[in-house]
Image (cartoon, coloured by chain):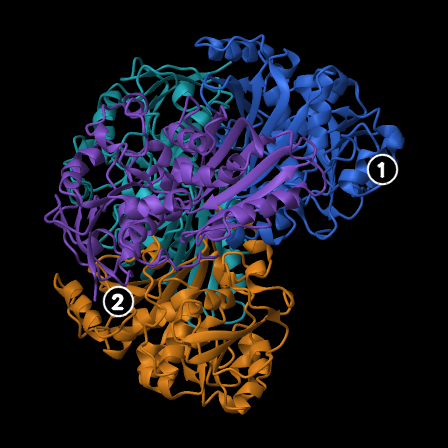
Chain colours: A blue, B cyan, C orange, D purple
Amino acid sequence: MSKFTVGIINVTGYAGVELARILRNHPEGRIAWVTGRGAAGQKLDQVFPHLLGMDLPIVPEPPDRADIVFSALPHKASAEALLPLLREQIKVIDISADFRLKDAGDYPLWYNFKHPGPEWLGKAVYGLPEMYRRKIAAAQLVANPGCYPTSAILALAPAIKEGLIEEDIIIDSKSGVSGAGRTLALNGHYSEANENLSAYALDGHRHLPEITQELQLLKPGLALSVTFLPHLIPMTRGILSSCYARLSRRIPVNEKSKQVILKLYQDFYKDEPFTRVVASPAQTKHTSGSNFCLIHPTVDLRTGRLIVISCLDNLVKGAAGQAIQNMNLMLGLPETTALEALAMYP
Amino acid sequence: MSKFTVGIINVTGYAGVELARILRNHPEGRIAWVTGRGAAGQKLDQVFPHLLGMDLPIVPEPPDRADIVFSALPHKASAEALLPLLREQIKVIDISADFRLKDAGDYPLWYNFKHPGPEWLGKAVYGLPEMYRRKIAAAQLVANPGCYPTSAILALAPAIKEGLIEEDIIIDSKSGVSGAGRTLALNGHYSEANENLSAYALDGHRHLPEITQELQLLKPGLALSVTFLPHLIPMTRGILSSCYARLSRRIPVNEKSKQVILKLYQDFYKDEPFTRVVASPAQTKHTSGSNFCLIHPTVDLRTGRLIVISCLDNLVKGAAGQAIQNMNLMLGLPETTALEALAMYP
Amino acid sequence: MSKFTVGIINVTGYAGVELARILRNHPEGRIAWVTGRGAAGQKLDQVFPHLLGMDLPIVPEPPDRADIVFSALPHKASAEALLPLLREQIKVIDISADFRLKDAGDYPLWYNFKHPGPEWLGKAVYGLPEMYRRKIAAAQLVANPGCYPTSAILALAPAIKEGLIEEDIIIDSKSGVSGAGRTLALNGHYSEANENLSAYALDGHRHLPEITQELQLLKPGLALSVTFLPHLIPMTRGILSSCYARLSRRIPVNEKSKQVILKLYQDFYKDEPFTRVVASPAQTKHTSGSNFCLIHPTVDLRTGRLIVISCLDNLVKGAAGQAIQNMNLMLGLPETTALEALAMYP
Amino acid sequence: MSKFTVGIINVTGYAGVELARILRNHPEGRIAWVTGRGAAGQKLDQVFPHLLGMDLPIVPEPPDRADIVFSALPHKASAEALLPLLREQIKVIDISADFRLKDAGDYPLWYNFKHPGPEWLGKAVYGLPEMYRRKIAAAQLVANPGCYPTSAILALAPAIKEGLIEEDIIIDSKSGVSGAGRTLALNGHYSEANENLSAYALDGHRHLPEITQELQLLKPGLALSVTFLPHLIPMTRGILSSCYARLSRRIPVNEKSKQVILKLYQDFYKDEPFTRVVASPAQTKHTSGSNFCLIHPTVDLRTGRLIVISCLDNLVKGAAGQAIQNMNLMLGLPETTALEALAMYP
């Protein structure tokens, strides 16, 4: 017996369809409707044959209320579609970036649009349960984090909050191609992306202000200087972020440093259901299809630098899975409901 | 509350570890022990970090009884390990080929060993629920089908049983590299298999006698002449079999033939939980991680040939998933228990 | 000192850019101009950074005559662009399908357009040097074969011409994704094509009439019944065709059959510079980047069926390389000029 | 008419076989012999079918002198095999690490063996033509650089030599799987490496002392603090290194910085045949199969950090191609001989 209804706006992108896949096995919720423009009129399992038996019609616009609504629209369109629902006091989880940044002035700068509902930016809760669990549980509007920011913030939060590192931070992130979405583009064309490797957004990626905002909030006194560089990797799913920062002078660098740091990270996340600190370097395949973020901190003893490797599935913990984790919190359900799947290997 | 215990012999190959992954979320069963030679002494999630939190120790030999035992050993070793358990009347599902062939004389020919327990060949039930559901439910020993045979038999069974085709059959199968297992070999080395495509076993693959035996049993009067050629595809999971046979003369070849054949296939499998006949050509990605076999039959109107495309995940419906489907049947549980996951896409 | 000038119409597709790459090291020819619509105004190495130092401007239309002109336009557009040049008696190699079929009536049927210059279909020579070397050398207009047809015809020609097989032929072909070109499409989107495998064009692929026409010409008395089914493989380059046909009754099936057939194939192609009969199954990686077609014939002794595996690089022997081989013949140069590169492995 | 003879020791690894492939089209040299242990007795094109027509027998030991000898043996074995040849005054290019480090004490530390010929470490010339062209031309023994060091040193040399950056340097390198060689290992097993991404050697990779040694030599006064972290990428060929360092205070950070740095890099390499500074971020596919190293320097204006991206093919400029470039220099031939091939794309 389902206890609540769910609506998905723009089910036809990779985040949307992943929401549908995971929610299908949620014991408490029922997908009441799904929207999608190009595919409107078709059934879900016609457009996405892997969703066998999910024969919900795709409709152009939300036909109805629902207890909770996810938006997987692109930025700008998402805010526009959600504002009416927000005013009706419907609970909303926005997978786009439209409510992640606190400063409305960042939207014209990074996303090329003037925010249509800046009054909601203060009310939105950044949907990273590891940082804001209680606020999420009480929120009407959750801004689901970006995939890169999830991997970067979880990797660096213990170090920043505990004052382990200096302010110079380099985040070298690598992502599978599904991160670029289902919209056709030359750099996502198989023959271009396969057997190829590239850095992109060298002038500044849109996830940078989000990463900086959240890291800075963890230690307001520290003047962070963050370089974030994303890379496109020839695989479908997965993000690995390699983070580098010099240890603060008060941390002695010696044989024991690695264990000290590892222990500190383990303590930091010891009660987290989905963020795990591991003793050997994580690999993206260890998280493929699961909602886990795996973190491995270590120390480069020659230079006194902290290195943190974090891995996650960009479509699960980096998007749909984390959104459902947030939904569970918002509805007072066990946080791990419908998210029990382990990673698929090999 | 788990109601029964499971043992897994040789958990360290891809079929074994996939059994562990799926069984972890089985509501009724509990893995009591897992064996593995090279990795004995380590914990399951040390060797396989994606099995987060499964800290069962890997032991060298079965330490105990269990309500049901899976063997994921290679052929020959599997029969040797299972015979003692069989004599103790333990329920057994063998993922190797050791109890699939009815004729003991086939083992020296195709697998290079004399079968150590030929008396069990008659008692073993071939674990294809679509064909032998009732017998499986009553069996002590189930021989879990090979990955290629599952795809080929399910693709051709309706046509053969309904007398749609002549005796000349060509099965051109394509498999991802995980089908070759976790044992190191040059043709499974990344730099050799990636961006490469090859046919292999042109002199006869070990799955041929299994395919022929089972197809022939469906229509004893037909003298089948089967060519089966497997190909290695640069992807991890998935099998697609393209099957070709001339329509028997009594089937008229005209514009309606495709619909007639499609309808006939749909009727044949209409009550199956995991074998689905689809109206457009299936793709392996539609089954990745799920226990489904998708089948698309059509007719080449120019030549009067039946073409059937079947897709499945070689490690799920082609191995561990089907084994658990058999376990559910043998224990009187709902057949789909723990197998509800949809395919992971993209 | 270059002795002749070359023009390339539509350099911006994969066949066009491969022509440019290979011709750059041709000792006798010089690329005089290249055309391309979307990229007009840019330089070749701006659009294709791997063509380092080739700073030829891309122009919208042929600016000039050239001693020989390649067209890598899509079908229909190619015929339209080439007819004026043909009338000026310029030597032309058309990589599209527009002059491959002898029967003008096939164009509306298979390519959805009425041929604008049917009088040229009889004059065009099918550019498969192994079959038509002398005619190519004397031709003004060469219709460069399709990638699938090259692999299929070379695989089956000896068997058909020598009367080894019966008329029922199945060609199960597998191609890398670059065969679908550089134009964006969902089935060529990385996240859709990667880790996926599918059959397509089950109702009849455009290369079927080309294959049938050429095979039939080899043995006019035989009423061929050809099924051709292409598959999309998650790799960039390469085609492997698996061809099946029953041996004609006059060929005895016994232990010696494989050697007899192998010898016969080797003799058939013994003087060919680029088509090689090999004693073990060819793999696509053995031809990646080279102009070779590798062929391995064998016999399924259980069923008396001939199996032939052929491999080639769809963009070299399947397109640009074969076009340059034809150019060399048309200009009286050594056939292998600029085509000496071995395959890149691994 | 070949003018000199070449011997290849251990032709059967990926560097060795790539040497054979490239040298086959060298107009001045002739491969006189090739050695290989496991494959001894077979012909080159039997073991490597892509080397069609290269039917040189593989012998267990060098049978003869040659004008120049390449060793593609693993470290330690290489030094042992080469010392006798060196004493006979044969010209040698060692692709292993055995003569790259100046300090004999580094070998036990990083490679676990005591160097058997430390007197040669001072005589060996580090085979990076961009740095040591003249010395290479006069050398008897050239130590061919590692793949990672080639990418890192070429990326950073202009910045260090011109004093653009401070001493803290982070090199985040990503390599295709062929860098790990042809020897079987679990992390190079297709099903493990495919769709996976990992960092490795977090405790210090063997290429670190080589990178530090060479960078330090460029600016003896600067006390470099280098962190180098390699990552394994699911593709066969290619290395991309992302290098980060803070600009020294004397370099103003403003809108013009990017152009200033780009120009400076372009000037630095302006006469190099194979190292090219490009104005947009290089991708590995732009170098696949070619001997080019492409470098893109830019500035992160928010933090004042220099970012340099460098790309190359690990088996060509990162191994066999650079070795042949060195050979050309040592023999007084044009440096680009046999290395004219452009990258293969797509």
Q: Position of residue A191 (x, y in %)?
A: 51, 54
Q: Nearer the viewer, residue B246 or D170?
A: D170
Q: Give left or right: position of D310 versus A335.
A: left
- In this rendering, does residue A278 appear at all? no
The subunit carrying tag 1 is A
| Marker count (numbered) | 2
- In this rendering, does residue D278 appear at all? yes
Q: Is residue D42 above or below residue D109?
A: below
Q: Position of residue B201 (x, y in %)?
A: 26, 51
Q: Give left or right: position of D227 versus C28.
A: right
Residue A115: mark: 1
Q: Are marks 1 and 2 in contact (CB under 8 Å)?
A: no
Q: Nearer the viewer, residue C48 or B40?
A: C48
Q: Give left or right: position of C169 versus A189.
A: left
Q: Nearer the viewer, residue D96 or A281?
A: D96
Mark 1 on the same chain as mark 2: no
Q: CA distance from mark 1 to mark 2?
A: 65 Å
Q: Position of residue B12 (x, y in %)?
A: 34, 26
Res A238 → quadrant: top right
Quadrant location, the N terminus of chain D:
bottom left
Q: Is residue C118 above or below residue A163?
A: below
Q: Is residue C263 above or below residue A32?
A: below
Q: Amino acid at mark 2?
A: Arg
Secondary structure of the residue carrying numbered label 2: strand
Secondary structure of the residue carrying numbered label 1: loop
Q: Name the residue that disc number 2 marks.
A: C276
Q: Amino acid at mark 1?
A: His
Q: Nearer the viewer, residue B171 or A318?
A: A318
Res C168 → quadrant: bottom left
Residue beneath the point at 83% across and 35% down: A65
